[in-house]
Image: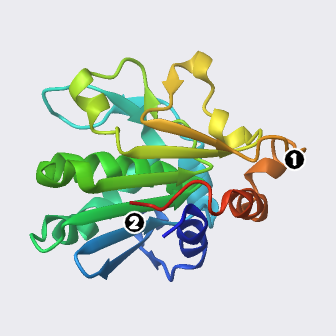
Amino acid sequence: MTLLKLFERTLSAPYIQLEENAASYRAERRGSTLYLFFEKSNGLTDWRNNLDFPARPYRDMDDLWFVHRGFLRVFKAVEPKIAEEVADGRVRKIVLSGYSHGAALALLAHEYCVFRRPDLAAKIRGFGFGCPRVVWGPVPRRVRARFLGFTAVRNCRDLVTHLPPAVMGYRHVGNLLEIGMGRRDGPVASHRAENYLEALAAREGTDGLVR
């Protein structure tokens, strides 16, 4: 599956929306591969969580690290819903994808999957299209390693991928793939799904498959 096809599926997936924090996700099994999709903002609750950016500890664990409070709140609503799928021994590969608000959830879900399925660490790939910054402050080495298979995809000058601002201590983790270079889209227009689709289509055949 190419990045374009993955993004198209991320946009079109029939999401399940939970009452708790309006969290929206989709789990699909194709053979031994588990796909986890996370939806963009689709209501007032999502926007309230997007803007609730004070950092808080991720969980009570040996390696202390901090994340965006609003995104963590939404992911915690999704976590018990995907736990059984992730733990299933028949799953031998996991692909995660989200757009915008959903990209932040995909990043947190990626860390969760690697932590819960260390046997699959090399077979877990996450992609966050138009991904905001989620992690705050110093990140312990063992935690950073869990994001090695995650890629934040930034189109042109996408403003959302620069928020919350780095001066507030927020940072990207994993890998950053910049697309749409040379396009004239402004910071807001660069975040629109149609412009991501165009930029990804221009790369089709050059950036390989989601492996």
Q: Is residue 181 left or right of residue 178?
A: right
User: In terms of image quadrants, where is residue 66?
Assistant: top left
Q: Nearer the viewer, mark 2 or mark 1?
A: 1
Residue at image location 64% in from the left, 39% down from the top = 161
Q: Is residue 72 visible?
A: no
Relative image position of residue 151 (x, y in whole percent): 47, 45
Q: Is residue 200 left or right of residue 63?
A: right
SS under mark 1 = loop
Q: Quadrant of the C terminus?
A: bottom left
User: Residue placed at 48% from the left, 70% from the top?
Assistant: 1
Would you name the residue on which mark 1 appears?
185
**Label 2 to label 1: alpha-carbon separation:** 35 Å
Front residue of 109 and 78:
109
Please say if the residues under marks 2 and 1 sit with CB atoms less than 8 Å apart: no
Q: Residues within 10 Å of mark 2 (few under 14, many from 20)?
A: few
Give the quarter of the image for residue 25: bottom left
Residue ID for mark 2: 20
For marks 2 and 1, the one nearer the N-term is 2
- Residue placed furthest toward the right: 184
Side (left or right) of 210 relative to 121: right
Which kind of residue does numbered mark 1 sit on? Asp
Name the image quarter holding residue 186.
top right
User: 12 or 4: which is nearer to us?
Assistant: 4
